[in-house]
Image: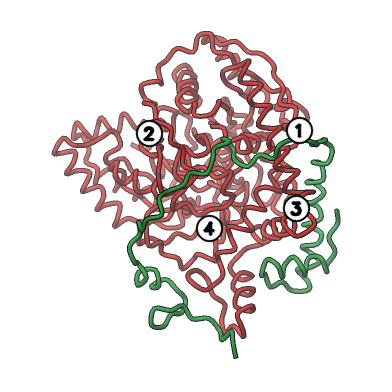
Chain colours: A red, B green
Amino acid sequence: MHDQSMSALGAALRARAISARELTEQYLKRIEQLNAKINAYITVTAEQALAAAERADQQLAAGTAGPLTGIPIAHKDIFCTNGVKTSCGSRMLDNFVAPYNATVVERLQAAGMPMLGKTNMDEFAMGSSNETSFFGPVHNPWDLERVPGGSSGGSAAAVAAGLCVAATGTDTGGSIRQPAAFCGVTGIKPTYGRCSRWGMIAFASSLDQAGVFARSAADAALVLQAMAGFDERDSTSAKEPVPDYAAQLEDSIAGLKIGLPKEYFGEGLDPGVAASIEAAIKEYEALGASVREISLPNAPLSVPVYYVVAPAECSSNLARFDGVRYGHRCEAPKDLEDLYKRSRAEGFGPEVKRRIMIGTYVLSAGYYDAYYLKAQQLRHLISDDFSHAFEQVDVIMGPTTPSTAFALGAKSNDPVAMYLNDIYTIATNLAGLPGLSIPVAPADGMPVGLQLIGDVFQEGRLLNIAHRLQQATDWHRMTPSLSAG
Amino acid sequence: MALDTSDVAKIAHLARLAISDGERDHFSTELSSILNLVEQMSAIDTTGVEPMAHPLHMAQRLRPDQVTETDNRDQFQQIAPQTEDGLYLVPKVIE
């Protein structure tokens, strides 16, 4: 069952060929067999999943089921889940049981999706390899010695390994698209403000956005449909109507104008990855699309700009973790300052500390104009580059990452080398645009992701463009060979 | 831009992070290498460019000043490290 599409599973559930309880049990069993190898889940919520599956079965029997009723999902451990540990991959929140559900969780629960558990992630979503998690790294299902990508590495690996049908993730600088590329699954980061951030633990509030991992664009469309939309509890939620994504999937892409930014095909791109991307672009041409080179001249500055904006916002957001109201508290504090300093020093790992300190520095008196203001100005230029590009083309395509998944430990001692892995994904977040990664031809046996970037609120068009390729090719159907043990 | 260990100590204090002497050396190297990356920004002249405050250039939405939440104090304090009579406890601040 674990390699079937969501619509096939939905049809089997509605035809009563399988019950939601049986389907959930199968996934729980697979998690039991394989999670020790992959470490994709921090928490497995078997009891809640089975109870939700039984409610789904009642709806299926009553004929009130929707397209997602009874389909098991996993949530990144950054989303608050009522009564369930929500660790954000950190020792700081190892003892945190959320007292409410995130809007995204609430909506998918209302759609009838049983939650199998909470997936592993880089600590506070800060990382590109899942190695900064307090709960240990996730192993890439395609090669257990390699990273799954990050920060939503557990969600990507869980979908790739068939440990859930779909999973939620968040993307601040590439944290959905990069692990989707490394694990060979489909991942979409919607437009900033498309999905509610309420109950999603904040990292960099002007960049964070929730999205989906699934085995295909068609599956992702169904989940995004249920997640997206205005939420008055998130002050940056967009008041834009949500179109019917599934209805758009089959639209023709004849005459589609694809832009290839020359900055995304230069030095530093692995030749094997480049060849896979070129092969996918050729498929699009065969489907009637036209291709032209474009330029995003300021895109190469997106990494430096990001490493001012994101740490600045993180240093402010993470100030709330002070050992007073919830989360980790140090033993025997001698005074209030000692309580703050030791609770935070013990609760946060090295990458989170680095980013808090960089953020604190760039926001400190005398440095604000040189760093934060300058970064926000450059952010405007990066965003304008995209606006100009979308006057000429319908969609921008390129590699999601410069290489395939790297070995565990290969970059963990060099923060800057790790940061440069997100060179093709970060600009999209700075401009607030939707981005999607789909698996294309592997390179040396490892998955490669093709990135699609659209104009604001063009998620439906991106899913449509991805779906058309997935109808014409089998790349998204490849699965890693995993044996229990 | 290079940060020395005394810069790191000052930043760590502002961020309320306890760090040991050994960590100070380590962080000064790492933070300096990150700031070197960030220095690439200075290659572009941004004179007169409006800073981007919101990715979609939207204005901040306001809501009526009405009570929308109920009192969940007891529930929220169940996950607190230390409370007493509905108050959060911290070490004595005023002698």
SS category of the residue bearing label 2: helix
Q: Is residue A145 above or below residue A446?
A: below
**Are the residues tagged 2 and 1 within 8 Å (C-beta)?**
no
Instruction: Estimate the spatial distance between the alpha carbons at disc 2 and disc 1, rounded to whole Å.
Output: 36 Å
Along the viewing direction, whichever of B83 and A417 lies nearer the viewer: B83
| Identity, as a three-letter code, of the amino acid under mark 4 | Gly
Q: Earlier in the sequence, mark 1 or mark 3?
A: 1
Badges 4 and 2: C-beta atoms under 8 Å apart?
A: no
Which residue does the numbered mark 3 point to in the structure image? A368
Task: List the residue tagged with mark 1.
Answer: A268
Residue A209 visible in the picture: yes
A289 relative to A216, above or below: above
Mark 1 belongs to chain? A
**Marks 1/3: CA distance?**
32 Å
Residue at the disc numbered 2:
A225
Q: Which residue is mark 4?
A: A89
